[in-house]
Image: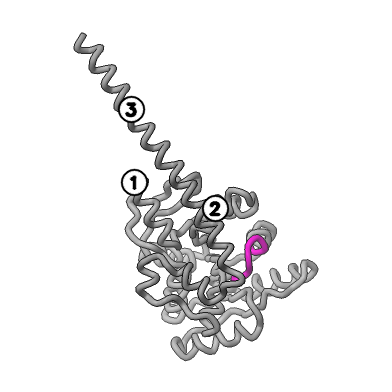
Amino acid sequence: MRESFLGCPIDILTMAETVDLAREAMRNRSRLQHVALNVAKLVNTRRDPVLSSDVASSDVVGIDGMGIVWAARLVGLPVKERVAGIDLLIGLLAVCAKEGFKPYFLGATRETLQRSAAQLHQQYPDLRFAGLRDGYFSPEQEAEVVSDIRNSAADCLFIGMPTPRKERFLAAHRDDLKVPFIMGVGGSFDVLAGQIARAPVRMQALGLEWLYRVYQEPGRMWWRYARTNTLFAAILLRALVQQQVQVMLGQRSAHSNSTRLRG
């Protein structure tokens, strides 16, 4: 069920529902693009037209961050659960291993991809990759990368390249890739490779994964989260005030109509 949240589309789906949509797309070879929406991405869509267009044109806009979950519930949207991008990725890789779908990993470094594949083969011995390609290629090499992905007959493409490079790549080549399911996974390859640890489960439940990332990489992450979290709070507060004003105006209008009818 698609809704508008703070001017951004979101799809209110459970993890199981999202996995089923991806599985169906891979079975039918019908294209389905998924984007994972968190607080930082929502805030950045307001100043980055390429990112905004990528989110708006995606077939599924998943609710990745607990901040989005809580805020959406606060404005009255019936969000049941968070669909974290890394958990969705792992769930879909399990589906691939079980049902014979072949994933293609694009992004990160060659070493990270090789470590990721090695770790995954230990957990899923039946998993077969369509391809692995690092994200360090020049604009002149893009046609070669697109050709390799298309010729691989991949069933799903997971892209671990930074914004806005990923969005620009997809905007230019989405129709040429011929991959049923496409999903951006951020830094998930680093997690799969064991190079970055996820926050403890308790911190995830409390929506404090961002704080754990700051702890891991303070020099790179503290300003990013300080800025986006503050901006998100301001955007949400303004929306809540506007919502309350509309409620009050509606009540006042209803009261006036009732008074006139009694008169």
Question: Which of the two discs, 2 and 1, labels the residue nearer the N terminus?
Answer: 2
Check the image and report above or below for 123 versus 55.
below
Relative to 53, is 204 on the left or the right? left
Relative to 74, is 144 on the left or the right? right
Is label 2 in a helix, a strand or a loop?
A: helix
Quarter where residue 174 is shown: bottom right
Q: Mark 1: few, some, or many residues within 10 Å (few <14, many ≥20)?
A: few
Q: Nearer the viewer, mark 2 or mark 1?
A: 2
Question: Which of the two discs, 3 and 1, labels the residue nearer the N terminus?
Answer: 1
Question: Which of the two discs, 3 and 2, labels the residue nearer the N terminus?
Answer: 2
Residue 218 location in percent, x, y?
Answer: 56, 72
Relative to 73, is 11 on the left or the right? right
In space, the residues marked 3 and 2 are separated at their CA atoms by 30 Å
Q: Nearer the viewer, residue 190 or 53?
A: 190
**Amino acid type, mark 1:** Gly
The circle drawn on residue 76 is 1
- Chain part drawn in magenta: 160-166
Q: Name the residue carrying label 2.
A: 43
Which residue is painted at 59% across and 51% down in the image?
A: 52
The circle drawn on residue 250 is 3
In which quadrant of the rendered image does the C terminus lie? top left
Q: Mark 3: few, some, or many residues within 10 Å (few <14, many ≥20)?
A: few
Residue 32 location in percent, x, y?
Answer: 52, 60
Q: Mark 2: few, some, or many residues within 10 Å (few <14, many ≥20)?
A: many
Check the image and report above or below for 236 versus 68.
above
Callouts 2 and 1 close, C-beta under 8 Å: no
Which residue is painted at 54% across and 57% down in the image?
A: 228
Residue 45 location in percent, x, y?
Answer: 58, 51
